[in-house]
Image (cartoon, helix red, strand yellow):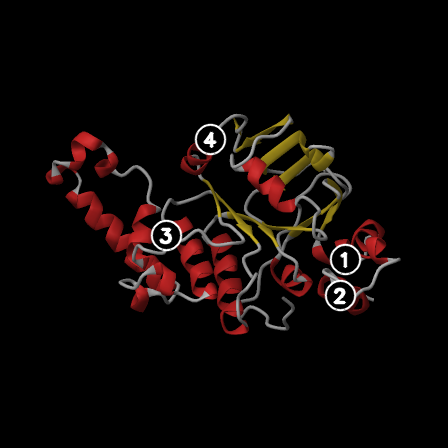
Amino acid sequence: MSSDVTPTSTPVKTTGLHVGDAEPGCRKVDPILIADGVKRTFGGLTAVDVAHVEVPRGAITALIGPNGAGKTTFFNLLTGFDKPDAGTWEFDGRSLAHVPAYRVARMGLIRTFQLTKALGLLSVLDNMMLGAKGQTGENLFRSVLPFLWRKQDDEIEAKALEILARFKLEAKKDDYAASLSGGQRKLLEMARALMSDPTLVMLDEPMAGVNPALTESLLDHILDLKSQGMTVLFVEHDMHMVRHIADWVIVMAEGKIVAEGPPQNVMQDPAVIDAYLGAHHDTDLGATDTGHVEALKELIDDEQ
C-alpha cells in the first residue's frame, strides 16, 4: 500500500539512540530487546541469520526490507511463535529462549499479526476482555465462585470500553468481530494489545489491507503508543509511513541486518538501495515489490 496520508500529530524524533556509528548491529543507549546469533533455516533455505541487533527503548523502530527478507519469521522467533536453530535473545534483561508465546506476552511483549487474529464469533468487547492478563476467573476452581472475580471482571470491562472509545470502536462493542472491516480488525487487534499494559508492542504490517480512511487513524494510534511510554517495533513496506513516524530503521535482506539508522539516512544507504533494487536488475519492475521500489526512489529524490 502506498499513501500520501500523514499523521495529524507530529512525531517527536528521539535523538541519541545509538552508541558510535549507525551501522548494522550497533549498540543502543538503552536497548529493550537484544538478539545475538539468531538463525532459522527451512530445509536448505536460511530465512533468518541475525548476528546482532538491539531495539532502542521508548522509540518507534521500523523493520523494513523486500519481500522474503525474513522480517515476519524474525518476529515469530522473538515472540515465541517459532523456534530458532541457534541464538539467544532477551527482552528487558530477561532471556526469551525457549519461552512460549503466552509467557512472552505476560512479560510485556505483545505482537500483532499481518493477518488479524480476532476471534470472529465473539463480540468486539469479549475480544478485548480476553486480552487482559492475570484474570482470577481463569482458574477452574475460582471461576465457579463469582464473588472472587466479579469486581475484577467489571474493572476489565470498564478498561476495555475506555480503550475502545479511544479507537472509536465503542459503537461496535456488541458486534461480532467477524463483521468488522479489515481496517477495523487492525484497530481492534492494536486495542486488544493495550489490555495487557505492554512494554513493547510489535506490529506486523499494521497498514496492510487498510483503506486510506483508517490509515491516518492507525498512524496516530502508533504514535500514541510511544507517547504513553511504550516501545514500538513494526514491519512496514510503505516508505512514506516509515519516514513520517519511525525514529529508527532496521533493514533486513536475505535474513540479515544490512543497515540501521535514522529514516533519512537509511533511505540513502547503498545497502538499502541494493536490497530493494538489486534483485530487480534483470526482472520486470512490475512484479511484487514495484510499489516499495518506487516509494524508495521517491524518498531518495526527496532527501536529495
The quarter of the rendered structure image containing the N terminus is bottom right
- The reply to whether callout 2 and callout 3 are in contact (CB within 8 Å) is no
Q: Is residue 265 left or right of residue 162?
A: right
Q: Position of residue 218 (x, y in %)?
A: 50, 63
Q: Is residue 244 left or right of residue 135?
A: right
At numbered mark 4, what does the secondary structure look like: helix, strand or loop? loop
Seen from the viewer's position, the closer of residues 205 and 58 is: 205
Mark-to-mark CA distance, 3 and 1: 38 Å
In primary-sequence order, the first of circles 2 and 3 is: 3
In primary-sequence order, the first of circles 3 and 4 is: 4
Residue identified by numbered label 3: 119
- The reply to whether callout 1 and callout 2 are in contact (CB within 8 Å) is yes
Residue identified by numbered label 4: 100
Q: Amino acid at mark 3?
A: Leu
Q: Position of residue 152 (x, y in %)?
A: 21, 43
Q: Amino acid at mark 2?
A: Leu
Mark-to-mark CA distance, 4 and 1: 36 Å
In primary-sequence order, the first of circles 4 and 1 is: 4
Q: In this picture, is 179 found above or below 24?
A: below
Residue identified by numbered label 2: 299
- The reply to whether callout 4 and callout 2 are in contact (CB within 8 Å) is no
Q: In this picture, is 52 found above or below 128?
A: above
Q: Which mark is residue 267?
A: 1
Mark-to-mark CA distance, 3 and 4: 21 Å
Mark-to-mark CA distance, 4 and 2: 39 Å
